[in-house]
Image (spheres, rainbow, N blue to C red):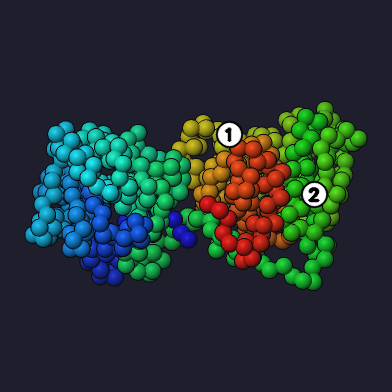
Amino acid sequence: MRLYTSDEMRAADRHAIEKIGIPSLVLMENAGVKSLFTLERILAGLVGKRFTVVCGKGNNGGDGLVIARHLLNSNVPVYVFLTAEPEKLGSDAKSNYDILCKSGIKPSVINNEQDVDRFRIAMEFSDCVIDCLFGTGFSGQIDGLAARVVEAMNDSKACKVAIDMPSGLCANSGAISPVSFVADYTITLGAPKLGLFLFPGKKIAGEVWVADIGIPAVSFAEIQSENYIVTSQLAQTLIPERDQELHKGSAGKLLILAGSDQYQGAGIMASYGALRSGVGIVNLGLPESLKGNLGCQVLPECILDFFAAKDGSFALEADMVENFNGRYRAILAGPGWGREESAKMTLDNLLDSWNGQLILDADALNLISDPTILKKCPHIPIITPHLGEMARLTGKTLEEISANQVEIARQFAIDNRLILVLKSAVTIIADHTGRIFVSSRPNSGLARGGAGDLLGGLIAGLAATGLSPLNSAVAGVHLLADSAEFAVSELGADSVTISEIASYIPRAFRKLRGDLPDAPQ
């Protein structure tokens, strides 16, 4: 399912109006009617409930005026408020204002603090307050009297519903105004908007519903949005059915180069993900300094190898790396390496001499001073930084990365010809062609050490089975999200361990294959 920016939605609207010939008033009528139908499903009926609708001067306000009229026509009590004088309304909104007045309701205009107080009183007698102040075009901050109106809505004990976007939320970036409407539900119009699925916007959007307002598919096809939400349906298309004639050799072979004297468990945790990916053989390579000194349990299915080390980390010469060619389909490198000079040499030799699929995580990323060196990889590499590692790779601040994850990820992946998995509460996957895949499934159970190692191993294992780099990244992120939701549902977010989450990956695979219902939300 595609996600749209404000400019893309305006372009789709414009195409429907100018090229298809659907009048803008018809689209506004559809928006109001379909919002009301959706609201009826959310609230399990409208009869016996009271509503307050607050409208701005633009098209979002016009949608609210249509909603109010149809509530009136259904004999449902509704209070209607405007934050602009009628003569300042947009053309279509003004038309619907006039229709509403002739139908029997004249909206109240909020001009001052006394009007805000009257608005508060109306909401005291309402079961639901509907936010139609600002639509997809909003950016910046809500201030002045509009801020007081939003604060009043947030103070209400009524169910809070936003139409299209909660007021104060940027449809493109997910950024929010210091004063923003905090919705229980958002009914977004025509198609889902990108900002609804990014933090901090996701926190104020509540449960998101999409209302079809009659924009033809051809109008959306003209836009060709490059942003997608990762869903079960998408993930199911990425992993082919497992061939019953597979053997361990044809199922793929993965080498994990991970761990150091200081971080023994990183490679072992990565192997937990890899062994559950469907790959045929997992070789876990550790620095030889750990031989006889391992304090962690290695799963017996792993083939354990020890490689040259110096200062407690890997020290692989070019000839050793060349020996890997033809033996493995993919290599995961970086978890728990540390930042010793020998580790830097190992990375350089991998980039120069390894001709298979490369997945880089953790310290391998911290050892890169110039990301353009990744273009040397014969296959499109996969890198999996968290926000802090991404800040170091790009030379930007953590705040800059957090505020604009999608566009920074997109440009970095294009510029450096790679697949980027940018890990945070919402994970952004960007490919070298500019496509973005958003996994918007935050889970505090994953907020502990080892989660990145587990994901790296899972993605690398999928790549070793023969999946494309992009499909491996998207499917791996989705499977881990499902696994974490299953684990937290049964064990709780407070004390679940990453090892326990790994044990739920088989259940996530069963769900992906259609053998189980969706993971708990």
Task: Please say whether residue 380 is visible from this viewpoint.
Answer: no
Q: Is residue 513 left or right of residue 342?
A: left
- The residue that disc 2 covers is 255
Q: Quadrant of residue 327?
A: bottom right
Is 309 placed above or below 216 here?
above
Task: Please say whether residue 3 is visible from this viewpoint.
Answer: yes
Amino acid type shown at disc 2: Leu
Query: Mark 1 or mark 2: which comes first in sequence?
Result: 2
- Residue at 62% x, 51% y is 486
Q: Is residue 478 left or right of residue 86?
A: right
Q: Quadrant of residue 425?
A: top right
Query: In the displayed image of the protein, which residue is found farthest to the left?
Result: 102
Q: Nearer the viewer, residue 372 or 388?
A: 388
* SS at badge 1: helix
Q: Is residue 172 left or right of residue 324?
A: left
Amino acid type shown at disc 1: Gly
Query: In the displayed image of the protein, which residue is found farthest to the right?
Result: 292
Identify the disc placed on residue 343.
none
Q: Nearer the viewer, residue 63 or 427?
A: 63
Give the CA separation, mark 1 to mark 2: 26 Å
- Mark 1 crowd level (few <14, some 14–19, many ≥20, 10 Å Cα): some
Is 15 placed above or below 285 here?
below
Query: Residue 101's x, y, as percent?
Result: 10, 56
* SS at badge 2: strand
Identify the disc placed on residue 388.
1
Is 351 placed above or below 276 here?
above
- Residue at 87% x, 40% y is 307
Query: Residue 426's x, y, as percent?
Result: 52, 45
Pointer 1 with pointer 2, Cβ within 8 A: no
Query: Residue 266's x, y, as percent?
Result: 74, 39
Query: In the displayed image of the protein, which residue is found farthest to the front?
Result: 48
Q: Is residue 5 left or right of residue 295?
A: left
